[in-house]
Structure formats: C-alpha cells, structure tokens
Amino acid sequence: MGAASFSFQVHVTESHCAARRGAISLSRGTVETPAFMPVGTQGTVKGLTVDMIRATGAQMVLGNTYHLALRPGAEVVEAHGGLQAFMGWDGPILTDSGGFQVFSLAQMTKVSEEAVEFRSHIDGRLFELSPERAIQIQEQLGSDIAMVLDHVVALPNDLETIRDASERSIRWAERCQDAASGQVDQVQFAIVQGGLDHELRRQCATELAKLDFAGYAIGGLSVGEEPADMYRILAVTCPVLPETSPRYLMGVGRPEDILEAVRQGVDLFDCVMPTRNGRNALAFTDQGPLRLRNKRHALDRRPLQEGCCCLACRHSRGYLRHLFLAKEMLGPILVSIHNLTYYQKMLSEARAAIEEDCFLSFFDRKMEGWQASREADAE
Amino acid sequence: MGAASFSFQVHVTESHCAARRGAISLSRGTVETPAFMPVGTQGTVKGLTVDMIRATGAQMVLGNTYHLALRPGAEVVEAHGGLQAFMGWDGPILTDSGGFQVFSLAQMTKVSEEAVEFRSHIDGRLFELSPERAIQIQEQLGSDIAMVLDHVVALPNDLETIRDASERSIRWAERCQDAASGQVDQVQFAIVQGGLDHELRRQCATELAKLDFAGYAIGGLSVGEEPADMYRILAVTCPVLPETSPRYLMGVGRPEDILEAVRQGVDLFDCVMPTRNGRNALAFTDQGPLRLRNKRHALDRRPLQEGCCCLACRHSRGYLRHLFLAKEMLGPILVSIHNLTYYQKMLSEARAAIEEDCFLSFFDRKMEGWQASREADAE
C-alpha cells in the first residue's frame, strides 16, 4: 500500500504570481487545492456534526495526534476502526504529529535526540513521543496523511537554538520515513522549520526536499510573529520546495494570511480561527469581522452575510446575538458553521480566480472589503 | 382572528383505557396527539438547529415567556417578527405564561391579587407579571397557544395556601381571557392547580371548564411528588376536563410518566428531561437509560439504540463516551437529538397503538424493556 493511492496534480499556475490550482487525490476522496481543513482536534470539529462539516464545503479535516493519543488513546481509536470510522467522517483526514502541541500545551517538556518527554496537560501523566512513536500512533489513527514529528521552538529565540531544532527536525523527518510500516494507506508530509531565519529555512527545505516526501509543510509560523515576517519566510521557503508536491502552511490563519500564502504558492491550510472565533461570537464577512455581542446588532434582522447559504445565515444577527448573550450552545454552533463556510467559500473563489488567471485582482477585492470595516480585526 | 384557526379533533379513544388519538390544527401546522413538545426555553432547543428539531419528529415547540421576557425582551422578539421568525421555527409554538419560572427561578417573589412581583435571576432587575401582562407578552411573542398565568406553590404545603393559590389561578385565568386583544392568531389554555388535593383539583378543573378555554393544562405537578401521587391527581382531574379539548400535562416527564398520562387521556406534554439528561450523558433506550460516561462503553461500537435513525446513532457508544469525557459540545448535541428522537418515536408508537386499540399492551411492553435494565433510572 503506502503512497500508492496518493497523487497531486497542479492544473494551473497563475501567470502573475505563484498561486496554483490543483488537486490531492487520496483513496478516501479528492481535495481541490488550494484547500482549507477545519480542525477536529479531539475527533470532532467543535459543535459540528459530520454532515455540517461536509456542508461547509470541507473535503479534508485535520485531527490532532497529541489530543487523541492522550484521550481516548490511539488504541481506542484503532479498536473503533480508525479515526474516520470513530468520528464518522467519510473523507480524507490529515493528522499532525503532536509536535506543536507537545511544545505548546504539554508540561515539563524535555527534548533529547531520541525523543521528547512530556506530561499530559490533562492529568500530568508522563508520555514519550519519538519520531517512530508519532508515526505508529498516526498509523493507528489511520489518517490518510501523517505529519512527521518536528522540534518546534518558541519565537523569538537565539539562532543556535533555532538551528539545533531545525536540524533535529530534519533527522526526525528521516526517522519518521523509516518508521512507516508500509501496512497502511498513508503518506507522510515533512515539516520545514528554521524560525524567522532565511538561511535556516532554505537549508531545512532543501534537505527535506531531497528525502522525497509526498508533501511539504511550513511549520513554526503563526506563533506570534508579525504577518510581514511570516510572508517573508514564505517567500524564501516556497521556491525551494518541490513544485510537484503540495505545500501546506500549518496553523495559518487569518483570511488575508491565507490569500497571501496562496499567492506565494501554498496549497493547503488549517486553522482553529474560524471555529475558535465563531465560538467567541466573531463572524467573518466580506465587510470585515462582526462582533455579535455588540448591542448594535440587537434589532438587526439581516443575516451575517447576504447571499451566504449556511445555516447561520437563515437567522438574523439579532437572534445570533441573543444566543451568545443567553449563553446558548446554538450561538457557537451556528457562527462556527458560518465561519467555516466563509473560509471554504473564500478558497473556492480563490480556486476559480486562479483558473481564470485573475487571482491578484480577486485578492485585492477581498482586501478592500475587509479593510473597509471600522471594526477591530479578527485577532 | 382569535380562536378561528384552532381546532381539536379526537379521532379514536381506546376501549380499554382513556388514551385517545387526535390532532390539534393550527394555522402554522397540525400537531398529532398525543404529542411531545421539546422545550426551547430561550428561543432555542439547546444545541439543536431547527432542522434538527424537525428531524426528531417534533411538530410544536415550547417557548418560555419568563426567560424571553427577561432576555432578549418581548419587544425585541416582536421587532424580529415574533418567536417563530426569531428562532426560525416554521411550526406552531406554545408559550408558557412564566408562572412556573417566577415561582421557581426568580428571586424575592411577592404575590398579590393584582400581580406577582419578582427579581430576575439573571441580574436582579425588578419585574411585575400580572395576568394581563402575561398575555400581552405572549401576544408579542406571537405564539399559537398561550398559557394563562397561574399561581404555583411548592409542595408539600398547607391546604389553605394551596386553596388560595388554586382559587387565585381561576380568577387569573379569567383575567387572561379578558386580556386577549383579539388581534393575534392565538388561543389560550387554562391551567388546573390544586396541589395533591383531590377536591381542590376537581373544583379548579370544574370552574375552569366553565370558561370555555381552547385547551386545559394540568399544572403544579412533577415538582418532587411521588409518581403515584401524580397519577392519582391525573385520575381525578382528567375526567372533569372537557372531552372535546386537548389536555396538557405540563413539565412531565419520564417516559413511563408520559405513557401513564396518555393512558389517562392526556394529549400534550413538554419536558426538559430528554435535553437536560442528554446534555448530561444519559441516553434513553428501550432497555433503560445508558450513562455514557461509564467506562464499559469505551470500546463499544454499537449505537445507542439499534434501529434508531437519529444522527447520534450513526456513531458508536464509545465515540459518544469520548465526546463527553473530552467535554466536546457534540456529545450534548448528539445525545439531546437521540433523546428527543426517542421521545417522539415513543409518542408516534403510542399514537399507532391507540389507533389499533392496543395501547395497554404497548405500554406493558415498553415498561418491561425499561425495567429489565440494571442501570439506575433517569431521575
């Protein structure tokens, strides 16, 4: 089995920028790129049934290895037939390696060349995650795309620490590749590290590209740095990555960040922003974000976004505001649905624009709408 | 307008008991009886979209006047076109009068013959609710069926207090009738009070029956009394109520209580039990309730109930358990859907059994299944 059922085609590349329109084919379905994956951290996209996820337009979801390994445990998910069967999602799933969470959520994290040792943020239990274990867990979860274990460091940081982590990430990527059992229909994506340093990023991308992974992710971004820094790193990294493989910008981000990354040739995204912000009463629209707890929405009978066909937009802004003030679950549910629908529609429009070789004017139009808003941004 | 678009037909009455099969016709839809209404306290059945409510089989939902009057306010709901438009539910709605909540949830409640004064449980604001105001609010909410304001007392209580409240409830019912503007398509149901005293219940029902309401509710039950006491009160009250009007047992209850009340000739029910218990990981099944946090469900790949076509039953018990342990919203959502579907299916089966004149054997069969369970009951 192995990589047999994976393929990536680039249909069109823009003539005015690096944006490209393609498709990732997997045995469980096709993902039209550029694509956005909703985040299903604990085996569920928070508040949405699988039918609702599908209705937003999502074709692939992300599962978090760290969370699932801690609870309910990879063995439990495996006993239920893997993550797809467990959560009832019939499309492809990408799992991260747990690296990012181990370095951000877990406690008392200790890194050695062999593995990273940490304590669960839930109950303090001691765990060890090695590259081999990260792949074993992801094989138990049965995801279509597994991510290699990477060593993530906080930014800003001194160059030696970043270099050390970046070089370890390359060695760990190789060990992940060797650890694949060949028994499951799963491919691996490597992750480029290197902080905000151009040279380290280029080196890391160049070394990983030699290893012939199915896809390449850009990690360690969206950790508090300025957008301009992120864009700069994309500009030095994307050109070094193989043109024939999908490029995945992990954990990013705001609508404008996603479109900027698409412009630079990124194919795949995930972010908690649409769901986390949705749960917190912030709705994305073409006129910028709406903060639904604001009193000015109380009597507003308009939907969040004219022309949006999501479940939330069958209701008025006034009703949605009421749900949040009354602490009703339906508020977070509906605005999460709206935001995910908004992201999917934005990517769908981006794909159409690339096909017509007019991505840049599409991008400008979107930015104008968002910037016209007087409301605070989505951060 | 007024009562013009309301009618109630009894199609069949059982030959072995008082169970009856009928229909309430309203301009916004027909409610097949006996019927169960899910509770949409704050303009939402907690965690369910209106499509999900409809998919459970519900034909009418209940809205709570007390909660809606406090937040967002009856004027806000009215400005949105009434409760149906506000929550996006296209079927009939029954609103309670707020009486029960004023006497159970509110603070510093003071009753006079004129009105009841209380402080909001949300922010301590002072409110006054008179029979006239209760009807005015319900007309603003635009429900199809309004309930009269009643004086509810805690049980057990001394006979004089119960008599006083019961007699005031009759006078308030008359004032509610007089308060109807005649400008909205809304009918009123009266509420029988009288505690656990046979004579008071009979008197109250007899007096209210003379007032020619569209329907009659039995209130002040399911407040902690023994099931046998509730059944006893139903037995003395139901025969006094007009045969040609729907009978509504408010706030009840457990599946076995509902079937017992159907046996005695009750047509309409509402209760938070399926949703509240669902949010708390308790699922109703024909083999008795399942407590989903229990470890024994961890590897169980069976659905909650074989043959159930609800969204929850597309998943395994093990997955649902995981959602509750991981504190994921989807757990409460799915098990609320399951429980509401379970209640609706039970009522649908009860209606079919009455049509075939075999309600009692249906009732016995259900009770056998529930009692076979070793798990604790749904209380």
Image (cartoon, coloured by chain):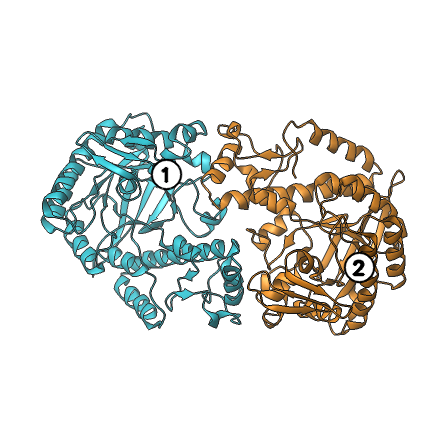
Chain colours: A orange, B cyan
Residue A187 can be seen, yes or no: yes
Residue identified by numbered label 2: A165
- On screen, residue A370 above or below A207: above
Quadrant housing the N terminus of chain A: bottom right
Say left or right for A353 vs A325. right
A247 or A14, nearer to the observer? A247
| Position of residue A95 measured from the top left corner of the image (x, y, whole percent) | 69, 60
| Position of residue B367 measured from the top left corner of the image (x, y, whole percent) | 30, 67
Say left or right for A232 vs A375. right
Q: Which mark is residue A225?
A: none
Quadrant housing the C terminus of chain A: top right
Circle 1: element type:
helix
- On screen, residue B307 above or below A217: below
Please tell me whether mark 1 or mark 2 is closer to you in this view: 2
Residue identified by numbered label 1: B67
Q: Amino acid at mark 2?
A: Ala
| Position of residue A52 measured from the top left corner of the image (x, y, whole percent) | 58, 50
- On screen, residue A172 above or below B91: below
Say left or right for B216 vs A174. left
A207 or B320, nearer to the observer? A207
Circle 2: element type:
helix
